[in-house]
Structures are given as C-alpha cells and as structure tokens.
Image: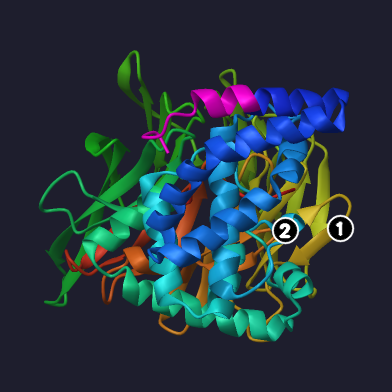
Amino acid sequence: MGEHNWSEVERLYADAARLERTGGAESERQAIYERLQARLRPIALSMARELVGDARRAEQIVETTLKYLSLLVARYAPTDATCAQWFGKTLIAFAYNAVLGKDAPLSRDPLSLLETRSLTEGEHQLIEWLLQTLTPDEFTVYYECVINGLSAAEVAAADGFEVSEVERLLLQAKQKVRDAFASEAGRRALTQALGMDLKWLGAPRPSDHSSAAYSVANNGAVAGVAFTEERRPREDGGEERVYRACAFRWQDGMLEELGALGEGGEPRCFITPEGDRIVAANNRVLLLWDRAHGVECSEVSGIVCGACARAETLVGQQDGRAVRWRNGVTEFLSSENPSAAHAVSADGALVVGHTHHKACLWDASGAPRPLGTLYGGCSEAWAVSADGQVVVGKSDDRAFRWTTRDGMVALRLHEDDFSHAYDVSADGACIVGKMLGERGMHAFLWTPNAGVEDLNELFAPWLSLHSMLECAYGVSPNGRYIVGEGYCAERERREAFLLDVGAPSHTN
C-alpha cells in the first residue's frame, strides 16, 4: 500500500466523509463518489492482483468492493482512520469471500475485529498461503478462531456450524498450517503477520543441565533459574544427583547470570511489570537485581513465594505458616500450620495462598477469606490479578479461576482432568499453567473467549519435531508474553521458553 499515491484519494475521502457526517445534496454526493471510485480503482486493482493472481477475479473483487463504497465511507467517517488504513483491509475481506464463494456483507467483515491499520507484507503473504492451504470451511474457522480470537461457539453461531464441527475443522486447519509453515520462511511469515513467536532461552553456562523461566515483564524481559547437575557418592556406594541453581535475566537475546541460589529447594524468580527489578529466592537466599544498582544478596528467614508489582512486599512461608514481609517487618498471616502465602496483589495489600491446604485470601487487614474447593478436597491459590479480584490455582488437581461473583470454577470440565494454574494477567483475563495431555504435561493458556488452549497446538508451527512446551509458569501483566519450561529437541534438554502471543484479543 505504501507504493501507491493516496494523497488525492484521501482528499476526496475527506470530502465524502464530511458529506456523510453533515448531509448534502444527492448530486454533490454522486459527483464526489464517482471521482473517489475513479481514483481508487487502479490502486484497488493492483492490490487485488497481488492477493488472488487471477486478473478477472481481481477485477470482480474490486467492482464488488467499490459498489459498497458509500456504505464503507459512512462506516469509517466517524473514526480517525484514513482511507488507506481501512480500504486495504476491506478489500482483503471481499477477496476472502470471493475465494470462498460467499457474499460479503459488511457486518461479517472478517477483519473488522483487527486494529484499523495498513496490512503488512507478512499479512499479505499469510493470507495467500492460507487460502492455498485450507479448504473454505477450514479457512473460515481458522481465521476467526486463531486470528480474530473468537470462540468456537461464536463462530458456530455466526456461520451456521455445530460447535463440534467448528472444533473438528479447527483441529484439521491447525495441522495443515503446521505442515505448511514448517519451513523457517513460513515461520517468519507467521511471526510477521500474527506477531506471535517462540524463543528457547538457553542457560547462562554450557555446563548447565536445564533451565526454567518463571516470570516475564510487559516488555518481554524474563526472570528464570538454571540448574547445574552434580553427582555425589553415597555411603552405600551409589550416587546421588544434586542440582545447584542460579538466577538469570534474559532480554532481547541477551542472557545474564545474576547469582547462585544454592542447591535443592524450589527456587523462584519475580520480575516487575517494567522489567527493572528482579527478586530471586531459594532456601533462605534472597537476590535482588535492580537496573540501577545491580545485584544484592541477603538472607531471608523463610521461603519466598511471591512479590508485589514493585517487589517491595514479599510473601511466603516461615516456620510452616503464611507470612508477608514489608518495610522490613515480618507479618504472620496465619497461626495455622501448615499454611503458606503464594502471591500478592500489585499494591501488596491482598495475599493468596492456603491454610491446611484450603485456598485462602487475606485482605489488607490480614483477615482470611476461605475460597472453598471444587469437589471438597484440597485447594491452593497460586496467583492473583493486580486488583485482587481474580484468583487462580488448583483444587482437587484441577486448575480453577475464582471471582467474587462466580466463586471457584474449574477451567476444564473433562472428567479425568489433571491441571494446575500458576499465573494470571493483571486484568484476570489470561491464565497459564499445565495440564495432562497425550504426551505428558502440556502448557496451556486460558482466555474467556477461547477457554483452555494447548500452547503446543497454538504454537505448533514454531515447534520442531519432539519439542514440547510442558509448563507455563508466568504471564506478563499485559497478557502478551508467556514463560515456562519445556523440552527443546535441538539441545536435547529441558529449557526455559518465551512465547509472544501478539496483541491480546481477549475480553474480560
């Protein structure tokens, strides 16, 4: 689109938009639209030929689009969008429907949910590739579910499918897309068009046995832990394996070792939304990295499990009881043993965890609120939204989402489900964790529109053969990035990963 001269078109569009907003004589409107069509036609023909290749079909698409020009101008006149911004995406929409053999009513514009902007070269390439790869029904379902972020139920209602048929078509389409985009060039096209990407983060030292990423900032900066394996002789003549942990920071391809966290335990890292501070802890060792001052190492009397947005308030467990550390003061949240605090709201006021393995929320005063269970067994809260209104965790070995309105609700309704939810975005609309799948543990993403999605399916084009995303531990506050650990087949070890899901399409 950047190769075309839009200046005269934009001037005529501005005149037409003004008439649509204020009214005018029919003769004046007709004259403006005739001139606008004349200026748009050669640009539209050039664009349409790039899309479909066939000259006759391109002309048909252009004539159909221009036939609705007055309706399109009326639709976009109240917005700040230029003609160049909306005309391209609308032309693409008519091209889709022409290839699919359907009418193109404006209310069903398949790109209407996308941000109003010019289409990139990668999107043009992706469109053409998908049209050549998928059947018409597969294309419709894939485009609306994967790219526009609609749920299977929404697509079924709009296009006259059964929900089960949408799910079947989507599964077929994803497999075909995975095969079609298996090449490096295909993955680059997908990344450029959708804004999605997968990166294996490696480890600070060549000798490291494995790595895991636990927390990610809004800018994609990552905090994680790498492990070095040692084998020590036992008194009985055998060997025992001991793992030493070190914290690391990753950003823009650069991996920096922050410091040792000792051996054993369950080390964890937390990064602030801006990516400028990191807390890493394990077995009373506490590391604090600050962009301005570097790394400071200290001791903490307990196990740190969570941190607030600025990493100034920490929560965890001390002497078997839930505890909060803030302003240098240790505050026990529960007298019950066992109890633990696992996460804290952005302002440090609300804390979630468990008492006697029943999920619990402590308010700003420290008063506990039981969150219940799914089926009467155990439950633990692992994360909380920025405002404390959404809590996630596990109950009876099933991932749950808790809100004041709905209480505790299972994320998956499968009878034999085994899943854990580990983190939630700031607005509560993105939840990540792990679930039992066909090949062991699979990392998942939950959103209100799509429900639970296997990240191995969502990122299938980026995964090499035998690689697996096993567990998602963290999601950025804005919902764009996901981190965790999986099996990287290229390096034959478990390794930290970073996923970029692009601009979030969920709604709360």
Residue where numbered disc 2 is placed: 401
10 Å neighbourhood of mark 2: few (<14), some, or many (≥20)? many
* CA distance separating discs 2 and 1: 9 Å
* Amino acid at the residue labelled 2: Arg
Residue 478 location in percent, x, y? 57, 38
Residue 211 location in percent, x, y? 28, 54
Colour setting: rainbow
The span picked out in magenta is 1-12
Q: Which residue is drawn at 41% across and 48% down?
A: 46
Q: Residue at x 71, y 78 (%)?
A: 413
Q: Residue at x 28, y 70 (%)?
A: 182
- Note whether 52 is above or below 28 in the view shown: below
In the rendered image, residue 4 lying in the magenta stretch gets the answer yes
Residue 394 location in percent, x, y? 65, 64
Horizontally, is 185 left or right of 212 in the view?
Answer: left
Number of dots carrying numbers = 2
* Amino acid at the residue labelled 1: Asp
Q: Which of 219 and 309 is in front in this view?
A: 219
Q: In which quarter of the image is residue 106?
A: bottom right
The answer to whether the residues at label 2 and label 1 have Cβ atoms under 8 Å apart is yes
Can residue 158 be seen by looking at this rendering? yes
Q: Return the mark for residue 406.
A: 1
- Note whether 237 is above or below 6 in the view shown: below
User: Which of the two discs, 2 and 1, labels the residue nearer the N terminus?
Assistant: 2
Circle 2 SS class = strand
- Note whether 460 is above or below 343 in the view shown: below
Quarter of the N terminus within the rendering:
top left
Residue 58 location in percent, x, y? 48, 60
Horizontally, is 336 left or right of 232 in the view?
Answer: right
10 Å neighbourhood of mark 1: few (<14), some, or many (≥20)? few
Circle 1 SS class = loop
